Image (spheres, rainbow, N blue to C red):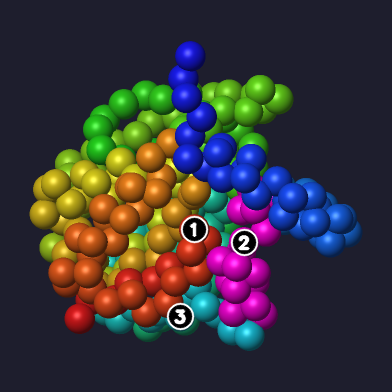
Amino acid sequence: MQLPSAYEMKRVVLYPKIVVGRRRERHQVGFMKSTLDRMIYSKGAYGFIGAAMNDPDILVDVTLGPGDVALDVGAYHGTWATRVSARSTGGTIHAFELSPVEVPALTAEVEDDPRIVVHDYGLGAVDEEILLSVSGKGSSAYHHLDSAPTVEGRIRDIAGVWQELGLDTVSVMKINIEGGEYPLLDRMLDTGLLPRVDTYLVQYHEWFRGSYSGRRRIQRALRKTHTCTWDHTFVWERWDRR
């Protein structure tokens, strides 16, 4: 029998906090309700909500000029890509979406913007076909819900895609891939790609086995070349090259 993960044990220890949080946030519904519960009503969750209310552009506070490249990894329906494109004077945004269920909506959203290129696969450590649990914004190949339907998606090795696209330095890389951030960023570390991105916007997900050590490992590597501009723990964080 598999031992409980560190996150599962944390939920047991903090169960009284969860009960209080559920009562306090009983007005919440849908994605926000489930997300706050998964995040154990943490300071990081509330800190980011407050920061986003203060600055609605917190996740799109980047601009691209001619020749710049951005990678939107976990593009979903293209909101981030279209907002960054609207703020920019040039550049190309490569939007990667693993779920074949979401690709049509993404393609329709960005079809009038020549700066945005859609790729119907995810980025990771290896080339593989993988089973994906379909749950809207929370769809994941690394966490399967019994109640969610599944589809097959395709992941490609970041190193191979980097070479195929002829990338040198990337201006900004936004990553929100429901647990896939760990193998992706580890692969970038192993292949020397990690320092070749000017700005990272990363959402780490706490409820995956190995998430705490994985995040620490990637942060240690990033500190060699980047500065953490802001950090809402296990929600979103931003790193900028020094």
**Helix, strand or loop for disc 1:** loop
Report if the CB atoms under discs 2 and 1 are less than 8 Å apart.
yes
Lateral position of residue 75 relative to residue 192, left or right = right
Q: Amino acid at mark 2?
A: Ser
The stretch of residues the image draws in magenta is 36-53
**Residue 44: x percent and y percent?**
56, 66
Q: Which mark is residue 58?
A: none
Q: Which residue is mark 1?
A: 234
Residue depth check, mark 2 versus mark 1: number of the one nearer the observer: 2
Our reading of the magenta stretch's main secondary structure is: helix
**Residue 168: x percent and y percent?**
13, 63
Report if the CB atoms under discs 3 and 1 are less than 8 Å apart.
no
**Helix, strand or loop for disc 2:** loop
Answer with mark 3 or mark 1, whichever residue precedes in sequence.
3
- Dot 2, how many residues are within 10 Å of its Cα: few (below 14), some (14-19), or many (20+)? some
Depth check: give the residue in front, 109 or 77. 77
Q: Amino acid at mark 3?
A: Asp
Q: Which mark is residue 42?
A: 2
Structural distance between the alpha carbons of marks 3 and 1: 20 Å
Q: Which mark is residue 61?
A: 3
Q: Is residue 44 magenta?
A: yes
- Dot 1, how many residues are within 10 Å of its Cα: few (below 14), some (14-19), or many (20+)? many
Position of the C terminus by quadrant = bottom left
The answer to whether residue 52 shows anywhere in this view is no
Residue depth check, mark 3 versus mark 1: number of the one nearer the observer: 1
Lateral position of residue 12 relative to residue 90, left or right = right
Lateral position of residue 1 relative to residue 29, left or right = left
